[in-house]
Image (cartoon, rainbow, N blue to C red):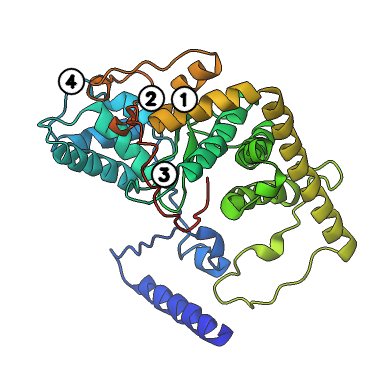
Amino acid sequence: GNDEREQTLNQLLVEMDGFEANEGIILVAATNRPDVLDPALLRPGRFDRQIVVPNPDVSGREKILRVHMRRVPLAPDVDAKVIARGTPGFSGADLANLVNEAALLAARRNKRLVTHNEFEDSKDKVMMGAERKSMAMTEEEKLATAYHEAGHAIVNVLVEGNDPLHKVTIIPRGRALGVTMSLPERDKLSYSKKWCNARLSMTFGGRVAEQIIYGKDHLNTGAASDITQATNIARSMVTEWGMSEKLGPLLYNENQQEVFLGHAITQRQNMSEETAKLIDEEVRRIVLQGEQQAWEILETNKDKLESVAQALMEFETISGEECMAVMRGEKINRKQDDSDNIGPVGSAVPSAGLARPSRDKNEDPKPESMNPQLT
């Protein structure tokens, strides 16, 4: 346990100090968790010169994409600058994987050139997970998923402070039955209290939408990941980010951080029971406030909820622009070849987004599957 960590640390320091008599030797190390390193490793004469290598910004992403795109035959509509703007937070490895996935997807579609559409679909695969079109779902499950994702999307659009809506799909991806994805307009270095509260409301949009349509008895485990995300945001607002007026700008979750290499596992409790109770009350208040805002928005815009859900049932995947058009009362009009002709402007819609053929009413529904988490 602790003895082994201390011995490892001490031996490492001894080996590093042994280099002092040698010339021309540079010791280099890399880590993704500098916060858990023992301060003794970072003192002058040891790892004292630290170089931070963050994820690339939009300019860096464009340059990385151009390097990886050299090996891929590209269609004229592919613009590395547009793709770079739509991939905030991607690392160099993520971008390399994106180009590779786009090339594989073009090959599966028997295309000689990789189009912008392949890059958009591959980006969705990297960010949301691979599609599971073979997953058996009844029409009732699909409709419930459509209402759930429509709720997320509508709250995302109508609550000021949220990132722009990018895409909504009821095609199962990863462990989720559906996904609503929003993307920031630029690289974010920090998050405002306004964004946090807006995000909280958005996470409850799906759960609230299902209750509005089916009643509170319809509650299920599908919103587990939404509840987890909302709770984590609210707790961080209270204990880390100083966004609670009652508790003020203090750090309360110090005990949850990783211990330093070589330090004891046990840490002191830096809050009283009364403070811990107050933290729980504040987290609960913030979470319920976000849920209440979602209720108010969706009850007021029930017609939009119905329209977006029906659009998802018809097309399975819609872009953010199409979702907002449906909310304005407009119709989605897609041509059969739209999936191959979408240019670099706006959000591309995957080829799976064409209207689904209607099913024979006498056809037996597919058997129910396990209940993965809705997103």
What residue is disc 3 on?
128
The amino acid type, in three-letter code, at marker 1 is Gly
- Give the CA separation, mark 4 to mark 1: 24 Å
* For marks 4 and 1 on the same chain, the one whose residue lies earlier in the sequence: 4
Residue 52, given in percent of the width and then of the height, sits at 45, 48
329 displayed left or right of 63: right
Q: Residue 160 versus residue 150: which sits nearer the camera? A: 150
Q: Do the residues labelled 2 and 1 touch (CB within 8 Å)?
A: yes
Judging by the rendered image, the residue that carries numbered circle 4 is: 76
- Contact (CB < 8 A) between labels 4 and 2? no
Of residue 208 and residue 84, the one placed in the foreground of this image is 208
**Other residues around mark 2 within 10 Å, as few (<14) / some (14–19) / many (≥20):** many
Measure the C-alpha gap from mark 2 to mark 1. Answer: 7 Å
- How far is disc 3 from disc 4 in space, using C-alphas? 27 Å
Identified by mark 3, the residue type is Met
- Density class for disc 4 (Cα within 10 Å; few <14, some 14-19, many ≥20) is few
> In the displayed structure, does residue 355 sit left or right of residue 275?
left
The reply to whether callout 4 and callout 1 are in contact (CB within 8 Å) is no
Provide the residue designation for mark 1.
320
Disc 3 and disc 1 in contact, CB within 8 angstroms:
no
Counting residues from the start of the chain, the first of labels 2 and 1 encountered is: 1
Q: Mark 2 points at which residue?
A: 347
List the single residue furthest toward the front: 362
Q: Do the residues labelled 2 and 3 touch (CB within 8 Å)?
A: no
Q: Position of residue 332 (x, y in %)?
A: 41, 17
User: Which is nearer the eye, 358 or 111?
Assistant: 358
